[in-house]
Amino acid sequence: MQIVSIEPFILHVPIEQKIISDSTNTISHWGVVGAKVVTDTGLEGFGYAGTHAEIVSDKAIVGIIGGALGPELIGENPLEVNRLWHKMYHHAPLRWVGRAGIVHLAIGALDIALWDIKAKAAEQPLWQHLGGATSDELEAYNTDVGWLSNPTEQLIENAKTAIEEDGYRRLKLKVGQADPMADVARIEAVRKAVGPHIPLAVDANGKWDLPTAIRFCRQAEALDIFWLEEPLWFDDLENHVRLVEATRIPIALGEQLYSAETFAQYMQRGAMHYAQPDVTRVAGITEYLRVADAAYAHRMPVAAHVGDMGQIHVHLAFYHGMTTMLEYIPWIARCFEDPIRVSNGFYQRPQIPGAGTTLLPTALESFGVSLS
C-alpha cells in the first residue's frame, strides 16, 4: 500500500449554543482542520486538529500539511505509522522553526489519518485494533453545561437537566472570573441544586496566578471539587508544584502540553493528579500513547481533553487502562460518519472500522472553508 495524495481541508462548524465563553476565549465556531490521506488501494484516512476557527492560523496548519509534511508522505506505506511519525517529527526545516504549536497540530492531523487507515485496513475500530477490551465502560462527564457565558440560573438549569434527564453522573464547570469568589458562589449554587453526590470538576483555562488560585482553593475545598483543571499558566511547572502542596483539591492539566517529555516533568514533580493529553497538541495518536503509558507508570488517571477531539479520544479511552472517563462536548459530531454517542451518561463503543474521523460529504459541503 502506498500514499498517493494528501488533501487538506478546513471546516468552520457553528456551535449550537451560538456563542460560548470560558475564562480566556469566546467563540461561535469550531475549526476542524486537517487532511484526507488517499492510498493506491482506495483506502482513505481522515485526520484533523481542533481550532477556534481563526482563518489565518487554520491556513497556516494546512499550509504545513500540504506544503511541507504531505510531500514527505507521498509514496510511503501508511501502515508504517511509527516510522512516519518520526519522519514528520524530525522534519528539519519545521523543527528549526517550531517544535510545538501549529507544527504539532499539522503532524497530529496526519498521524491520526494514518492510524485511521491502519484500523480500516484491519477492518476494526481503532480501540479494538489497539487491543482494547469489549467489556469496559467509559463514563462521560458533561462540560457543555458549564460555560461562563451561561448565567447562574441557566447553569443550574443545564446541570439539573444533564443529570435528571440525560443521565450524566458528573459535570464540569468553567471558572476563572476576575473575582474567584464569584466562581465559588456559582459552584455553591450548582452544588446545592444537584446535591452532594454528583462529582463537580472545575476548569480555569490557565487564567489565574498562584495567589488567586490558592485563594479560590481555600474557599472551594468545602464544596468537594473533583478536580481543578488548568488553574495556572500552562508552562509554569514550579507554581503548579506549589499549588499541589497548598490545596487538597486534585489538579488536572495537560491539554496545552506539547510533548511526552513535558508530561514526564510534571508527573515526576508531582504537579498533577490527572493527565489530560490532547491528541493533536502532542502531535498525534503515536505520542498520545506514550503519554498515556507514562501516566500508567505513575498510576495516574488519564482524562483526555476533548474540545472537540472526542471522535478520536473515545477510541483511545476505550483502549487505555488508565482512562475511565471522558469529557463530552458534541459540537462537531454531526460532521462524521460515526459520531460520538452517549447514552445514560456512558459513551457507546464505536463499531465502524477506523478512528471515527471519516467526514460526511455534507460536512465538507456545509462547513468547508476555501483554502485559497
Image (spheres, rainbow, N blue to C red):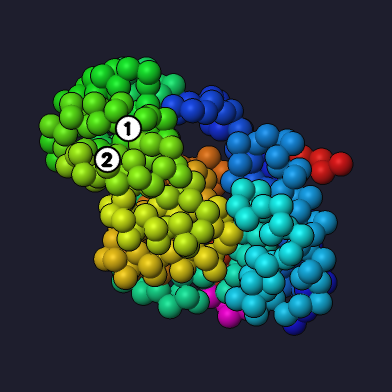
Question: Of the residues under marks 2 and 1, which one precedes in the sequence?
Answer: 1
Q: Is residue 46 magenta?
A: no
Q: Position of residue 166 (x, y in %)?
A: 32, 40
* Disc 1, SS: helix
Residue found 53% across the figure and 40% down from its top: 331
What's the magenta bit mostly, secondary-structure-wise? loop
In the displayed structure, 33 sits above or below 222; it is below
Say few, some or many: other residues with alpha carbon within 10 Å of mark 1 (under 14 / 14 to 19 / 20 or more).
some
Amino acid type, mark 1:
Leu
Rendered location of residue 352, percent (x, y) = 54, 67
- In the displayed structure, 321 sits above or below 60; it is below
Could you tell me residue 129's position as x and y percent? 50, 77
Compare residues 239 and 116 and report the one nearer the observer: 239
C-alpha gap between disc 2 and disc 1: 7 Å
Locate the C terminus and report the quarter of the image it occupies: top right
Q: Is residue 83 left or right of residue 139?
A: right
Q: Which residue is mark 1?
A: 210
Q: Which residues, given as a range, are shown in magenta?
A: 120-124
- Identify which residue is drawn at 28% across, 55% down: 270
141 with respect to 279 (left or right):
left
Q: Which mark is residue 54?
A: none
Residue located farthest toward the front when viewing the structure as drawn: 238
Q: As rendered, which of 267 and 349 lies closer to the eye?
A: 267
Q: Is residue 233 left or right of residue 295?
A: right
- The percent coordinates of residue 364 (x first, y second) are 73, 46
Give the residue pinned by disc 2.
243
Do the CB atoms of the residues marked 2 and 1 lie less than 8 Å apart?
Answer: yes
Q: Is residue 176 above or below residue 276?
A: above
Q: Dot 2: what SS? A: helix
Question: Which kind of residue does numbered mark 2 sit on?
Answer: Leu
Q: Relative to 55, is 195 on the left or the right?
A: left
